[in-house]
């Protein structure tokens, strides 16, 4: 895939984003604690590129994606879209912004209203954003969407439950594309699908990206899925980004021990290839009570004494012009 | 569609047969011999034998069961031990008073609880939601007897707003006797219904497709009315429809305390008098109406939910 033109200003820029969920308890449902689902995340996404966002389940990927679209309200920090701080916008303006920013959810079964026909599912966004004056205009647009996403015309009068998972995800993609967005958060769009279908959907999304010049934030829970679609990749652990770089940097020269562990769990088809196996010890700690210092230290193979006390910052790892950042005291 | 309805009705027949068998065993085998009850302790053997013959208790069990099945089909349950009236006539007489209490009370309860549930679900988690839910739980936890005693003492006796109890078959005189028991019915049922409907609505609020609707750019109000409510109507309608046939049976305690001559007080009287044929008829009717309510909701489902087909 061609390199993104990162000399352009970023399309999306996230600065020091924090999202806390209150944990309620007691009969009066008072707030007794909070989960820091996203903690001080900054990232940039450039026009036309795909940023892969990877991390184990529960590390805050969906929360980050939804905060960027303001489907949930960030606790702190800013999100800039085309240079505009959208965390300051009112509900009216946010709804207008939905024309430019869309989302595809993980579960294509649950994310379509079971009582609406495909036709109505696809027409609703056009009506909301007053696209297409007459119903003929709209149905023209809808049949174009069907073509783009590889769906048949007969689908229109059907209900979501009549389709397979792959077809439903195509419907979700068509629905997201209906309003001609520039930016789409793809929240594990293939995780719920059969392996045989996953590649088809990823290919479709890549073709659409080229054709329409889309920008993706592509979320996945393993590095394998995002390897081919991403220009750059960010690895998340317990609410923080621990490593980010171009896809090449990350897959060829991973710096953070967590990234190395994730990579070593991907099976390699070449049996002669020997690589160091890094096996993760234990489970992901609870986001409610994250470990002190570097959140990764209890599972880290190279942790030292100071990792328990001092949280590392993201710092530059490579010498190339492309940024390659990792947050580890001992990575180099 | 018609074929589906016919199939559903036919599939209810074995259930009904099973229910009939259980009721029969309960009354004829487990229940003991009712003739001793009727004649008292000092009856002679001859008297007992005569009565047993009169009621057919001397016949083999299977003949008695067939007689019972015949009774169900022909809606002729014989005569009451206590009043010697035909039971089918007693039932037909009781339906009117029962329904004139239950239909308005049920309508008011349903409309009011739906309205409140919509309100609290929309403001979920805020003070108005919490307050109403706490009031509902409080209202649910009080026994119906407490409502009846308080209502009769305070609103009827002290304030004199309603008659304490009684009944008048004529319209509109009948109405004054029905208001207080009707209000008590509403008060007792409201908490349960509000909480049920609220949960049904909130279950939908947390679904992914609601997030999709928000992501499309719909306003909160439109998301709520167009997407959430339409889907939560499925469990809500089911809950409403399944209760409708049972309205005929009336409300036991209310009718009995307020002297309303409906099926509820008839059943309570029958229990007091060990009037087995009446209790048996009412038990059978209750089961049949319940099966009928289930049938109605099954059919309704296929009409309102595209995921359920006629298969
Ligand atoms: N609505 C919510 N209320 C409370 N906690 C939440 C909520 N949504 C997510 N969380 C918590 O935030 C953390 C991150 O969740 P999520 O963003 O869904 O992770 P991921 O998408 O990476 O699997 C988890 O610990 C999860 O339990
Ligand atoms: Mg997720």
Image (spheres, grey):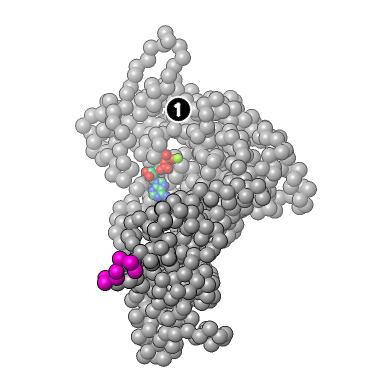
Q: Position of residue A314 (x, y in %)?
A: 37, 35
Q: From the viewer's perspective, is residue A217 above or below residue A288? A: above
- Segment colored magenta: B41-48
Name the residue rendered at 32%, 60% in the picture.
Answer: B32
Relative to A169, is B192 on the left or the right? left
- Does the magenta portion include B42? yes
Ligand 1 found in image quarter: top left
Pick out the residue farthest to the top: A272
Q: From the viewer's perspective, is residue B31 above or below residue A57? A: below
Q: Which residue is mark 1?
A: A223
Q: Quadrant of residue B149?
A: bottom left
Q: Position of residue B242 (x, y in %)?
A: 51, 59
- For this rendering, which residue is in front, A202 or B168? B168
- For this rendering, which residue is in front, B240 or B20? B20
Dot 1: chain letter: A
Name the residue rendered at 35%, 29% in the picture.
Answer: A258
- For this rendering, which residue is in front, B275 or A8? B275
């Amino acid at each position: 895939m061609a390199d993104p033109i990162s000399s352009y200003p970023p399309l999306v820029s996230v600065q020091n984003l924090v999202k806390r969920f209150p944990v309620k308890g007691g009969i009066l449902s008072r707030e007794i604690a909070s989960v820091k689902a996203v903690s001080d995340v900054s990232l940039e996404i450039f026009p036309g590129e795909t940023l892969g966002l990877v991390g184990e389940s529960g590390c805050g990927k969906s929360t980050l994606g939804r905060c960027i679209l303001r489907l949930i309200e960030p606790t702190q920090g800013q999100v800039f879209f085309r240079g505009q701080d959208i965390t300051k916008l009112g509900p009216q303006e946010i709804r207008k912004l939905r024309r430019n920013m869309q989302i595809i959810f993980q579960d294509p079964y649950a994310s379509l209203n079971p009582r609406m026909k495909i036709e109505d599912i696809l027409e609703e966004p056009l009506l909301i954003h007053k696209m297409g004056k007459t119903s003929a205009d709209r149905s023209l647009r809808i049949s174009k969407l069907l073509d783009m996403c590889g769906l048949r015309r007969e689908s229109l009068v059907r209900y979501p439950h009549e389709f397979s998972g792959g077809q439903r995800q195509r419907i979700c993609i068509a629905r997201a594309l209906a309003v001609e967005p520039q930016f789409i958060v793809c929240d594990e769009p293939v995780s719920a699908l059969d392996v045989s279908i996953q590649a088809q959907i990823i290919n479709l999304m890549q073709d659409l990206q080229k054709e329409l010049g889309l920008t993706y934030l592509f979320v996945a829970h393993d590095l394998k899925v995002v390897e081919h679609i991403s220009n750059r990749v960010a690895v998340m652990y317990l609410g923080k980004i621990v490593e980010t770089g171009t896809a090449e940097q990350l897959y060829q020269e991973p710096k953070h021990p967590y990234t190395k562990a994730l990579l070593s769990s991907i099976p390699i088809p070449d049996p002669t290839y020997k690589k160091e196996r890094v096996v993760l010890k234990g489970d992901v700690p609870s986001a409610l009570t994250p470990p002190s210092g570097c959140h990764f230290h209890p599972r880290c193979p190279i942790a030292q004494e100071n990792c328990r006390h001092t949280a590392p910052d993201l710092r530059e790892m490579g010498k190339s012009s492309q940024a390659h950042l990792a947050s580890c005291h001992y990575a180099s | 569609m018609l074929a589906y309805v016919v199939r559903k009705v036919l599939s209810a027949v074995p259930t009904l047969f099973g229910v009939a068998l259980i009721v029969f065993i309960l009354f004829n085998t487990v229940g003991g011999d009712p003739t001793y009850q009727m004649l008292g302790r000092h009856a002679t053997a001859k008297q007992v034998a005569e009565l047993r013959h009169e009621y057919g208790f001397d016949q083999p069990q299977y003949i008695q069961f067939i007689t019972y099945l015949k009774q169900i089909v022909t809606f002729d349950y014989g005569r009451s031990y206590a009043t010697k009236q035909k039971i089918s006539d007693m039932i037909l007489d009781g339906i009117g008073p029962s329904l004139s209490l239950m239909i308005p009370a049920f309508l008011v309860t349903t409309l009011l609880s739906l309205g409140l549930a919509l309100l609290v679900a929309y403001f979920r988690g805020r003070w108005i939601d919490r307050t109403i839910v706490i009031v509902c739980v409080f209202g649910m936890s009080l026994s119906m007897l407490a409502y009846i005693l308080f209502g009769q003492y305070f609103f009827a006796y002290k304030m004199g707003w309603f008659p304490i109890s009684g009944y008048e078959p004529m319209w509109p005189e009948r109405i004054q006797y029905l208001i207080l028991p009707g209000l008590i019915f509403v008060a007792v049922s409201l908490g349960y219904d509000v909480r049920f409907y609220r949960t049904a609505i909130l279950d939908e609020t947390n679904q992914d497709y609601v997030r999709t609707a928000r992501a499309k750019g719909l306003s909160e109000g439109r998301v709520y009315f167009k997407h959430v409510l339409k889907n939560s109507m499925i469990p809500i309608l089911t809950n409403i429809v399944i209760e409708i046939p049972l309205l005929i049976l009336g409300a036991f305690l209310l009718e009995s305390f307020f002297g309303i001559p409906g099926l509820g007080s008839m059943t309570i009287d029958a229990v007091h008098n060990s009037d087995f044929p009446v209790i048996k008829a009412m038990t059978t009717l209750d089961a049949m109406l319940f099966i009928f309510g289930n049938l109605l909701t099954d059919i309704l489902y296929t009409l309102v939910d595209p995921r359920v087909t006629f298969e």
